[in-house]
Every structure is written in structure tokens, then in C-alpha cells.
């Protein structure tokens, strides 16, 4: 009686003679190599077919322990202790902006003042 083998590549069912049990044959449709199982071998059981064991009852000593979570202070930046964060605030940024504008303006006035007049 031939052994029916399913090709894992294309899904075709191939009848294999009994003397090819334990060997590989080539699929007629996709030409992939397919292993022929032994004639008396049963297919391997699937993982979901095994019966589940009932849950083990808990002892009084096995109660879950509440682990305290660390408190985060999101207002403070993460810096090493004793070191202040190196951050420019909005006011400092505004002063730097105005200083840059006035410096560039002063340089422009100085450049215009030093330019020679053309006659």
C-alpha cells in the first residue's frame, strides 16, 4: 500500500511506494525534495494536543509580594548629585539673541563709518 506524502512546498499529495520509506523523493509538481516517513511511523503530536495540567494550588507562603516602584521626579533633570544642570532658560536665550542682534548692528554701523567716501 503506498504511503501518502504531502509536499511542504506546494502542498501536493504524493503516493510513494513502501520501498521508499525513510528516503527522499522529488515532488512531481514543484520538484522539491520530500522525505518519505516510515510506513509504521505515526505523525508527531502537535503541541496544542497535549493535555494541560491543572494549575497547582498556592500555599499561604507563596503570596505575591508587592515590590515598591521607584519614584520618579520628572521635574528635575537627571544629573549626577552635586552637579547643576547646564540649561539656558528662556530669559537667558532672549538676552543672548538681543546681544547678537545689537552686536551685528554695531558692526554694521562701524563698517559704514570706516568706509571711504567716493568723490
Image: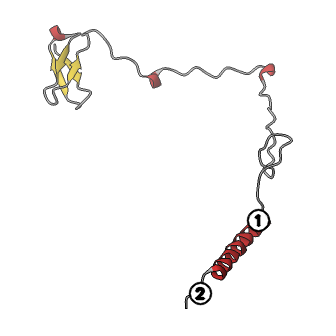
58 lies left or right of 119: right
Mark 2 neighbour class, 10 Å CA radius: few under 14, some 14 to 19, many 20 or more:
few
Mark 1 neighbour class, 10 Å CA radius: few under 14, some 14 to 19, many 20 or more:
few
**Picture quadrant where residue 2 is located:** top left
Q: Quadrant of the C terminus?
A: bottom right
Asked if the residue at tag 1 contacts the one at tag 2, i.e. Cβ–Cβ closer than 8 Å, the answer is no
* x and y percentages locating residue 82 in the rendered image: 86, 41
Residue in the foreground of this view, choosing between 53 and 11: 11
User: Taking 66 as reference, is 5 above or below it?
Assistant: above
Residue drawn at x 41%, y 22% is 46
Residue in the foreground of this view, choosing between 54 and 99: 99
Q: Quadrant of the N terminus?
A: top left
Q: Label 2, on which residue?
A: 117
Element at label 2: loop
Foreground: disc 2 or disc 1:
2
* x and y percentages locating residue 63 in the rendered image: 78, 25
Element at label 1: helix
The tag on residue 90 is 1
* x and y percentages locating residue 44 in the rendered image: 37, 17
The tag on residue 57 is none
Residue in the foreground of this view, choosing between 6 and 65: 65
Q: CA distance from mark 2 to mark 1?
A: 43 Å
Residue at the farthest front position:
119
**Picture quadrant where residue 65 is located:** top right
70 lies left or right of 103: right
**Picture quadrant where residue 21 is located:** top left
Upstream in sequence: badge 2 or badge 1: 1
81 lies left or right of 2: right
For the image, the number of numbered tags is 2
Residue drawn at x 61%, y 81% is 115
Amino acid at each position: 500500500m503506498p504511503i501518502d506524502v504531502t509536499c511542504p512546498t506546494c502542498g501536493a499529495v504524493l503516493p510513494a511506494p513502501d520501498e521508499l520509506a525513510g528516503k527522499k523523493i522529488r515532488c512531481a509538481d514543484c520538484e522539491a525534495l520530500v522525505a518519505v516517513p516510515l510506513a509504521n511511523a505515526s505523525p508527531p503530536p502537535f503541541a496544542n494536543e497535549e493535555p494541560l495540567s491543572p494549575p497547582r494550588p498556592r500555599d499561604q507562603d507563596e503570596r505575591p509580594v508587592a515590590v515598591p516602584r521607584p519614584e520618579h521626579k520628572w521635574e528635575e533633570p537627571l544629573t549626577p548629585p552635586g552637579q547643576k544642570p547646564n540649561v539656558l532658560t528662556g530669559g537667558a536665550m532672549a538676552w543672548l539673541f538681543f546681544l547678537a542682534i545689537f552686536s551685528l548692528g554695531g558692526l554694521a554701523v562701524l563698517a559704514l563709518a570706516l568706509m571711504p567716501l567716493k568723490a
